[in-house]
Amino acid sequence: MTIISVIDLGSNSVRMTVSRYHSDGSYDVLARFQEMVRLSAGMGKDKVLQPESIKRTLSALEKFKEALKAYDQKKLHVHAVATAAVRQASNQKAFLLDFKKTMGFELRILSGEEEAYFDYVGVINTFPIRDALILDTGGASSEIILVRNKKPIHAVSLPVGAVNITERYLEPDLITARSLFKAIMGMRQLFGDIAWLREAINLPIVALGGSNRTLAKISRKQEKVQDMPIHGYHLKIDDISSIFQDILSKNLDQRKKVPGLAKERGDIIIGGLLPLIELLLYTESRQVIFSQSGLREGFLFEQITSHTGHEVISPEPASMTVDTEDIS
């Protein structure tokens, strides 16, 4: 038995999963942790990680480090990966030194292609899908993967996410038609430059990331089906459109009071949902399937396969899809 911790330094939140796996490839999740740190906030055109953002992130990492003391250190293996915010940062080297000083080991920076691949591995090992378009919307990037016959045919990482879309285009309070239009045109230009995206017409979209999963959480509240897991939750385009229009009509204070929408996400939720909304329209997709399995799980699955030589044996759905309002 081996215990593995995977820390994901995202652009909006820092997450850690602690899992236990066995020689036959089976595993179970022992704990999940999350801190909203907004690491990419205020990076601007010069892509500089800001002191307050770094401070929040290092503070969250200290908490994670303390939590890991509860596990058998002889059996524990800790891995940490970073995505768009650190990948794009002009002061990346200084942050890497801060990370190593805090955690005692080095941080691995994933390329956009690696991030997309781990998303794919996380999804394909927990969903019985053959053909789909995977979208992972983060704080500063969005990964899109076209899956055919369970294989990743095309993938791209776009430098747009909930935080930087909001900072570049949208007001912090009530969103105006002018700013929304600019954001929409920005999304359409990005998608229009991806020639292979037309191959995804009418395919279901598998949606990852906190902003996307917020749609499922709001829907569960509305439908009073809180016992239904997020992983595998389905929504049709009409339902998504209705929820998005309702959120869009509200100011910041009103958005923070929407059941299922975390207060900390109220200011960036419109920007965070725009990639999914525009992708639905661009591909004429009629259905979204929400996934709680993504980068961290994909990285874990790769480790399990590498060390055991066996395919991953996922736990029962109930334990795979643990969901709380604090984990998004």
Image (cartoon, helix red, strand yellow):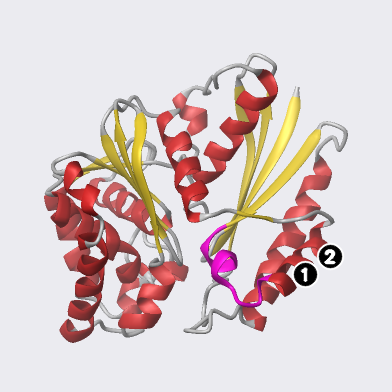
Q: Is residue 267 visible?
A: no
Stretch of the chain drawn in magenta: 83-92
* In the depicted structure, whether residue 97 falls above or below residue 228: below
- The amino acid type of the residue labelled 2 equals Lys
Q: Position of residue 285 (x, y in %)?
A: 15, 46
Q: Is residue 2 left or right of residue 239?
A: right
Q: Position of residue 81 (x, y in %)?
A: 63, 52
Q: CA distance from mark 1 to mark 2?
A: 5 Å
Q: Position of residue 123 (x, y in %)?
A: 42, 35
- Name the residue: 57% across, 64% down: 87
- Name the residue: 73% across, 66% down: 96
Q: Label 1 neighbourhood size at 10 Å, few (<14), some (14-19), many (20+)?
A: some
- The amino acid type of the residue labelled 1 equals Asp
Tag 1–tag 2 contact (CB < 8 Å): yes
Residue marked by disc 1: 98
Q: Nearer the viewer, residue 118 or 24?
A: 118
* In the depicted structure, whether residue 136 falls above or below residue 230: below
Q: Is residue 116 visible?
A: yes
Q: Is residue 86 magenta?
A: yes
Residue marked by disc 2: 101
Q: Nearer the viewer, residue 122 or 176?
A: 122
Q: Is residue 177 magenta?
A: no
